Amino acid sequence: MGVYSPPEIVDVTIQKGVEKAKASFLTLSVLGFAAGMFIGLAGIAFIRAMGTMPAEWGSLVLLIGACVFPFGLICLLLAGGELVTGNMMVVSMALFAKKITAKEWLRNMIIVTLFNFIGAFFVAYFFGYLTGALEGDFLERTILVARGRTKDTILQAFLSGIACNILVSTGVYLNFASKDMIGKIVGIWLPIMGFVMSGFQHVVANMFIIPAGILAGGVTWTDFWLNVIPVYLGNVIGGGGFIAFLYFAAYKIGTKKISPKDLAQ
């Protein structure tokens, strides 16, 4: 078959989590930068797709952007990338299975987060600002999107971060579920489109969007920190506390092995 069964997906995820936790600093830093870069490039496409569309078009404008944005996660998952929001689910699953230590979990989170930010900011500055891709006709949209990220209260940003990473981690999880490229693309694309359409907050996307807004003169670094800290914590709970723990509990803690005697009854 072209997909793994639900219990098999848990095993695949645990193995991936072990590999990520034990990867070298060079691997994590390079692939962390690549992931931030792909999310940043998707952010540019997202903003330009909505471009100068009139406000009267309502949610259709966001729907168009939401259809475009998932290519960033598709690229990094299929080509190779370390995205901290996905790792919040994958590496946490390995931690729950006691295949790695809490120190290894924390090491992965710190390195990947740092290089995700570097990659995202690199794109915001060099490819968004210096190239003029987010200037001119797209400047207003850049500021509008950045302000949309920073307008939430701390509680709203935290809860939005939880909801976001439930969907993003589901996309990563479905990527592991499929054995073929088309299945992986569809499994990633739909949940990511859903989180963007819902307006939920993704910390790495915000590491691109808010600095792009800062460079455009629409928001500040204070706005950045007041956003990314609660969003990051919400993302941790959404990926690790919901998706990783729920599926681990269901298929590793709550499922007993069925004996031939049970089947005969």
Image (tube, rainbow, N blue to C red):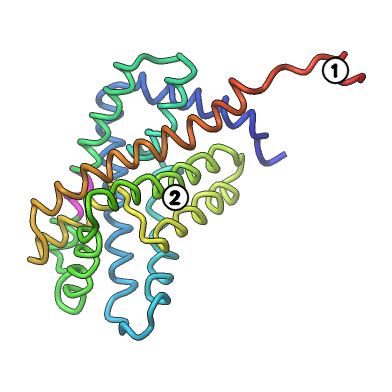
Which kind of residue does numbered mark 1 sit on? Answer: Asp
In the image, 24 versus 218, the foreground residue is 218
Q: Which residues are magenta?
A: 118-123
Per the image, label 1 sits on a secondary structure element best described as helix
Choose top left, top right, bottom left or bottom right for residue 101: top left
Name the spot of residue 130 as percent of width and height, x first.
11, 62
Name the residue tied to disc 2: 74
Q: Main secondary structure of the magenta part?
A: helix
Residue that appears at 62% across and 26% down = 251
Q: Circles 2 and 1: CB distance less than 8 Å? A: no
**Secondary-structure class at tag 2:** helix
Please provide percent x and percent y for residue 215. Answer: 9, 61
Q: Amino acid at mark 2?
A: Ile
How far apart marks 2 and 1 lie (CA) works out to 42 Å
Q: Quadrant of residue 254?
A: top right
- Mark 2 or mark 1, earlier in chain: 2
Does the magenta portion include 136? no
